Image (cartoon, coloured by chain):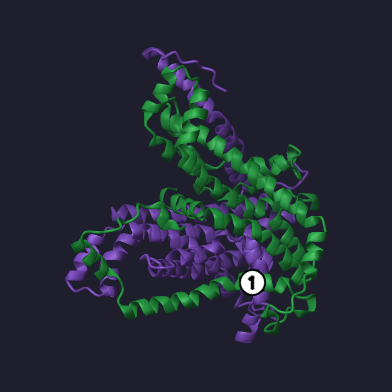
Amino acid sequence: MATTTAEAPRRGAISRWETRTGLLFVLPCFLLFLAFRFGPSIAGVLLGFFEFSIGDSPAFNGLENFRRLLGDPVFWDSLRVTLVYTVLYVPLSIGMSLGMALLVRRSFRGAGFFRSVFFLPVVTSLVLAGTVFTWLFSSEGPWTKLTGEPWLASTTLVIPALVMVSVWSKFGYGMLIILARLQDLPRELEEAALTDGAGVWQRFRHIVAPQLRPALFFVAVIETTGSFQVFDLVYVMTGGGPAHSSYTLVMALYDQGFKYFDFGYASAIGVALFVMTLVVALIQRLIIGRNR
Amino acid sequence: MSLTATRPAPSKQPAPSRRRAYKALEPSPAGKAVRVALLAIATPITLFPFYAMVVLSLKPAAAVEFPGSLLPWPIDTGAYEQVLGGRDLLLWTFNTLVYSVVSVVAVLLLASLAGYAFAKKRFPGRETMFWSFLSMVMVPYHVTLIPTFVLIAELGGVDTYWGLILPTLANAQAVFLMRQFIMGLPDELFEAARLDGCSEWRVFTRIVLPLCKPILATLGVFVFLWHWNDFLWPLIIGQGAEMRTLTVGIASLQQENVPLNVVLAGATVAFVPIFAAYLVGQRYFTEGVTMSGIKG
């Protein structure tokens, strides 16, 4: 606690006094970051180069974990599952978010109500959502009766099923971000286009859409890195099955780390995840840089 | 209450010419009809899982088969008696409350202290430190999972509240939001308080914190939501049944082959507090999202 009673510190004294209080105020946060973010981030990457299990001390084994990773069909499966999931999920969720944002854009009676309804799934935990949806997709559930097949039991339909649930639970988030941007757009451009006789589609295509690009891009990046890390839903709804067809990267990481206690190998999977995230960040920088 | 409440409301009586243009941008009757139709389809679809959750939880175990199960009658509260009668759900709720509430208070305090220092103080290494905090947003949480678990386990924090809470307090986004907000506060206020003889701690508690109320509310709701719904970390650190949170508990019910109506009764009970909080504090939830989205 800073007890500096500043009797209007003189000019020269300011910097030392400011330094002290400033550092003191940052210190608690800094220690936490050191212990639980900086340290573990570095350790997480380094552990990939070690053989390490619970109760053991880490033993350096070079690239062994990564060599094993590259030869492990389960890893390649989980990578493929994660990428398929991402490729299906990201465009669908952005489309849904954008569509809903455009629908509730103008204020009309009940607009607030609809926004609240569509945001409700976002505040619901994925575990609860997963529990209900497991029934909806189960052999007694409506979706199965409707489509004639239990999707969660199908190696080809399980990912689309999980994607549907994710879109349901997340589109409200993107909707709000896009909506916030939509409401900040100046009306004048659209009004001018209207007087020039531009229709709804033309106004969207040439005036609204270009101005929305930063928001759409932000949502795309968030959703992409988020879907690399999908776990809760998979854990609750399928456990990675059937036959590893919904076994995602983080499922693999969790199993290696906390089922088989192979911390080194699990960390190697974490490194793969990290690299994927960095690639997305890099692409983001390139595209944003080019737009400037 | 909704997102619009946070923005300057359009003036009630726009100038006539402006109103005409404004009106013209409004959708045509046909456009309106399409919009209403789409919303009328989307709303029940979005709400259906909630409806199913509540209705199925009010069925006897044998009657969860579609379509008969989706009529609200007859009601059977057996599942609720079972869920609320046991001590598990109470314990999980208590654990979740401890996890969320303590985390919110701690994150707000730590982040506003750091945010104030980053925004208004000059000290060596300030920029480097701030950007290194922020860069942590780029590191997936899962990369840090194993080292953090090992560290907490070594310190004896498995199955303890502090082991559950402490690692989640290093929240880069919170620090960033607090810094952004405090940067916008006028320096004169702090100077005046200092001239009146306030210690730096008093300036913080009497001037900075009260001025930060709006951002603290918004950030607080957001952090609360995140902790309330968090799953992976509580799953890992709570190895015994005693330390389960609601999310972990509900997931464990499902895996222990508890009848579906009981699981869903538990899920409904777990959903009620967050739903109530959502109804009351909707504006803050949505603000939290848009702020973290736009500035984060």
Which chain is drawn using purple?
A: A
Q: Colour of chain B?
A: green
Q: Is residue A71 visible?
A: no
- When the figure is inspected, residue B10 is found, relative to residue B131, above or below; the finding is below
- Farthest-out residue, left: A196
Residue that badge 1 annotates:
A133
- Quadrant containing the N terminus of chain A is top right
Q: Nearer the viewer, residue B226 or A29?
A: B226
Name the quadrant containing residue B249: bottom right
Marks counted in the figure total 1
Left or right: A61 with respect to B23? right
**Residue A97 left/right relative to B280:** left
User: Hey, what amino acid is under mark 1?
Assistant: Phe
Q: Is residue A228 above or below residue B210?
A: below
Which is nearer the eye, B137 or B107? Answer: B107
Q: Is residue A146 visible?
A: yes
User: Which secondary structure lies at badge 1?
Assistant: helix
Residue in view at x 40 percent, y 22 percent? B192
